[in-house]
Image (cartoon, coloured by chain):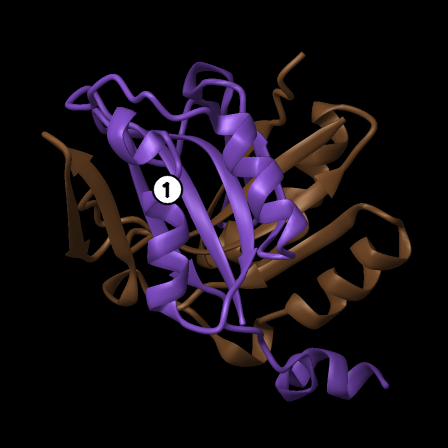
Amino acid sequence: MKYFMFVVDDPTAEPYVREQDTIADWVEEMTTRGISVDGDRLRPAADAKTVRIRGGKPLVTDGPFTEAKEMIAGFDILECADLDEAIEVASKHPMARFGRIELRPFWPFE
Amino acid sequence: MRYLMFVVADPTGEKSELDVEEWVTTHDSQGVRLDGERLRPVEDATTVRVRGGEVIVTDGPFTESKEWIAGYDLLECDSLEEAVAVALQHPMAQEGAIEVRECWPLDLAEFPETRAAR
């Protein structure tokens, strides 16, 4: 099963400690296990553009589609046996501690 | 440069005449669209946190809002302007909203934990 993993900044999380950031280990383990098939950090939400077309006119605004104190900082695409494995993988990601992680199953069009 | 498009369900959206399959075919053939998929609704989201060493698993998305991410596409474009132009051709620009974010690869060699392990 494929999952989209949102890696999210969360001001209520434990303070970030760079020396305890195990991201390189996580990437190595999940790539070796064939679980993380793609992923990247994203430029900050402040650098996002949100586009809409309303009444036939394009509207391009700066910033993310919604204002929240939690902000998406990156993503991974996971290939997992089931949700339990996806949760195990997410819980090992350093941002589960320094932020939060959302897992969402893929839903391909028939 | 890679750009991530969040395809957003937005209740202020309007009906679009555009066809999403046509958008996919066109941008796949131009090498602009690398990947993309629809995602299960937010009701099927699971949020994972580690606090004080404990793993906390909750149902639902990382934040509640009236707009929500319904899918994604990964693009290869020369600039943010090009990625915005591609996003504007997607039917969900009218039916919802699209957020465009530039990818920002991490230099994993900079991370002390792994340096120490080597």
Residue at (82% x, 81% y) in the render? B117
Relative height, residue A39 to residue B62 (above, below):
below
On the question of residue A104 being in view, the answer is: yes
Q: Secondary structure at mark 1?
A: loop
As rendered, which of B29 and B102 lies closer to the eye? B29
Residue at (25% x, 30% y) in the render? B94
As rendered, which of A46 and B62 lies closer to the eye? A46
Residue at (75% x, 50% y) in the render? A36
As rendered, which of A17 and A1 lies closer to the eye? A1
The answer to which image quadrant residue B90 occupies is: top left
Q: What shade has chain B been given?
A: purple
Relative height, residue A22 to residue B87 (above, below):
below
Query: Dot 1 surroundings within 10 Å: few (below 14), some, or many (20 or more)?
Result: some
Q: Which residue is mark 1?
A: B89
Q: Quadrant of the N terminus of chain B?
A: bottom right
Q: What shade has chain A been given?
A: brown
Q: Position of residue A58 (x, y in %)?
A: 17, 45
Chain letter for the residue marked with disc 1 in the picture: B
Disc 1 residue type (three-letter): Gln
**A67 lies left or right of A102:** left
